[in-house]
Image: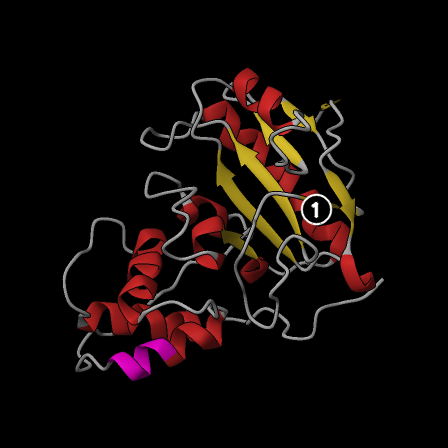
């Protein structure tokens, strides 16, 4: 896979000598990849990512993997509260309300596989921006194909047992925390963030189906709660 170098000045050192333990996926929410590239490399905008994948599958390397890109902002995942220092950020050229282009998805898979191998990041460590910033962010959104990544061993997808458990918000939230959701957000916001990724289109009060999905997630290999250091 060819990667095009397009350095962004919007980066710095990873704080505390940590190594990446997460990969955060985003959508650009911009008309074109070129527009996103310009913004991610504009020092006035103070935003960046390690990689940008265009609709046609071109992959741009913007920030070295050893550096801290400015892509996640405020948020948390597991024990991590400085997500930028602990993660690799990948921007996907997509307006936010459309399917992700086939060449883009085909380029994402080997890019993810390489990053995960280099940094020993397990599949649960590949997360959505909306996972670590619930309520504040919604990317990569309900049109992103998480099942495809899970089938390739590049993320996780819950396989619930029978959905016959009485809804219990406290138990539901405990299961989300066991998986990694740790941002300080109201229960309804966390439920929405969970559904955005694992049950797109679901709405209303907590359901037995939500309970079963969350239980399946809690059984997956959780993200290491001790952030690795260099």
Callout 1: 10 Å neighbours few (<14), some, many (20+)? some
Chosen colour scheme:
secondary structure
The residue where tag 1 is placed is: 115
Answer with left or right where residue 21 lies relative to residue 158: right
Under tag 1, what secondary structure? helix
Residue 80 in picture, x, y percent from top left: 61, 67
- Compared with 49, 210 (above or below) is below
Q: Quadrant of the N terminus?
A: top right
Residue drawn at (38%, 63%), measured in percent from left and top?
Answer: 158
Residue 112 in picture, x, y percent from top left: 63, 43
Start-end of magenta stretch: 169-173
- Compared with 200, 15 (above or below) is below
Q: Main secondary structure of the magenta part?
A: helix
Q: Is residue 172 magenta?
A: yes
Q: Is residue 181 magenta?
A: no
Residue drawn at (49%, 58%), measured in percent from left and top?
Answer: 132
Residue 174 in picture, x, y percent from top left: 39, 81
- Compared with 157, 147 (above or below) is above
Residue drawn at (34%, 65%), measured in percent from left and top?
Answer: 190
Answer with left or right where residue 70 lies relative to residue 172: right
Whether residue 219 is visible: no
Answer with left or right where residue 59 lies relative to residue 65: left
Residue 35 in picture, x, y percent from top left: 53, 18
Answer with left or right where residue 97 lies relative to residue 113: left
Q: Count of labels shown?
A: 1
Depth order, front residue of 216/89: 89
Residue drawn at (39%, 40%), measured in percent from left and top?
Answer: 144
Q: Quadrant of the C terminus?
A: bottom right
Extreme residue toward the front, this view? 44
Whether residue 118 is visible: yes
Q: Quadrant of residue 47?
A: top right
């Amino acid at each position: 896979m060819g990667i095009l170098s397009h350095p962004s000045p919007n980066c710095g050192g990873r704080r505390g000598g940590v190594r990446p333990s997460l990969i955060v996926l985003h959508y650009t929410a911009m008309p074109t990849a070129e527009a996103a590239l310009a913004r991610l490399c504009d020092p006035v905008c103070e935003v960046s990512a390690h990689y940008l994948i265009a609709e046609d599958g071109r992959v741009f390397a913007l920030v070295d993997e050893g550096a801290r890109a400015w892509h996640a902002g405020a948020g948390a995942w597991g024990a991590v509260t400085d997500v930028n220092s602990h993660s690799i950020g990948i921007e996907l050229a997509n307006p936010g309300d459309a399917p992700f282009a086939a060449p883009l998805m085909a380029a994402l898979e080997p890019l993810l596989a390489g990053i995960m191998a280099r940094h020993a990041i397990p599949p649960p460590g590949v997360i959505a921006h909306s996972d670590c910033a619930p309520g504040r962010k919604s990317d990569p959104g309900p049109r992103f194909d998480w099942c495809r990544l899970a089938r390739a061993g590049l993320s996780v997808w819950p396989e619930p047992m029978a959905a016959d458990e009485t809804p219990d918000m406290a138990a539901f939230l405990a299961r989300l925390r066991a998986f990694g959701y740790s941002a300080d957000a109201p229960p309804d916001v966390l439920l929405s963030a969970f559904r955005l990724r694992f049950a797109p289109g679901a709405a209303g009060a907590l359901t037995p189906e939500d309970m079963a999905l969350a239980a399946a997630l809690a059984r997956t290999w959780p993200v290491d709660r001790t952030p690795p250091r260099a």
